[in-house]
Image (spheres, rainbow, N blue to C red):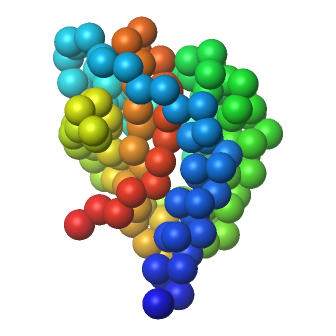
């Protein structure tokens, strides 16, 4: 197992514990994919800018209970510790996970590019966040 693989596995575990415990995905209503892409990308940019309280406002009630601004700050610091300083986002893809829509934001850090999968509920609020590999 390489050092990078260990980092990704550790980050996935941390994200699952910190953010995904309450994840309850619902069927998303039809909306313009570009709207979700823009929303997900704006969320990542808020994290990168240290605007954790503003980013938390995008969450549904379940996520707000589990992912406080302080936890978001810790998660972002953890990611930068393992992947290096944040550089930029390079795009976003709409896809499905177990039949539910999600947006994967390609997020470039100094040492690695990762996908940050942002899940939305039926009210277009963020209902989950997960680190995923991108090719």
Image: 121 above or below 95:
above
Q: Can residue 24 be seen at all in this image of the molecule? A: yes
Q: Is residue 91 left or right of residue 70?
A: left
Q: Is residue 39 left or right of residue 76?
A: left
Residue 26, image x and y in percent?
38, 20
Q: Is residue 50 left or right of residue 88?
A: right
> Which residue is more in the foreground, 50 or 18?
18
Q: Quadrant of residue 20?
A: top right
Q: Can residue 45 be seen at all in this image of the molecule? A: no
Residue 112, image x and y in percent?
44, 72
Q: The C terminus is located in which quarter?
A: bottom left
Residue 76, image x and y in percent?
64, 52
> Which residue is more in the foreground, 29 or 98?
98
Q: How many marks?
A: 0
The residue sitting at 46% across, 80% down in the picture is: 5
Which residue appears farthest toward the right when viewing the image?
70
The residue sitting at 70% across, 58% down in the picture is: 77
Image: 81 above or below 63:
below
The residue sitting at 61% across, 27% down in the picture is: 63
Residue 25, image x and y in percent?
41, 26
Q: Is residue 4 left or right of residue 124?
A: right
Image: 65 above or below 11:
above
Q: Quadrant of residue 53?
A: top right
The residue sitting at 30% across, 17% down in the picture is: 28
């Amino acid at each position: 197992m390489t050092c990078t693989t260990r980092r990704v596995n550790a980050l996935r575990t941390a994200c699952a514990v910190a953010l995904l415990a309450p994840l309850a995905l619902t069927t998303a209503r039809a909306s313009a994919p570009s709207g979700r892409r823009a929303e997900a990308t704006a969320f990542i940019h808020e994290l990168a800018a240290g605007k954790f309280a503003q980013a938390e406002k995008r969450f549904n009630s379940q996520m707000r209970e589990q992912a406080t601004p302080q936890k978001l700050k810790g998660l972002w610091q953890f990611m930068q510790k393992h992947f290096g300083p944040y550089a930029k986002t390079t795009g976003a893809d709409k896809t499905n996970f177990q039949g539910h829509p999600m947006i994967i934001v390609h997020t470039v850090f100094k040492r690695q590019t990762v996908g940050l999968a942002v899940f939305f509920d039926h009210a277009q609020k963020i209902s989950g966040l997960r680190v995923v590999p991108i090719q």
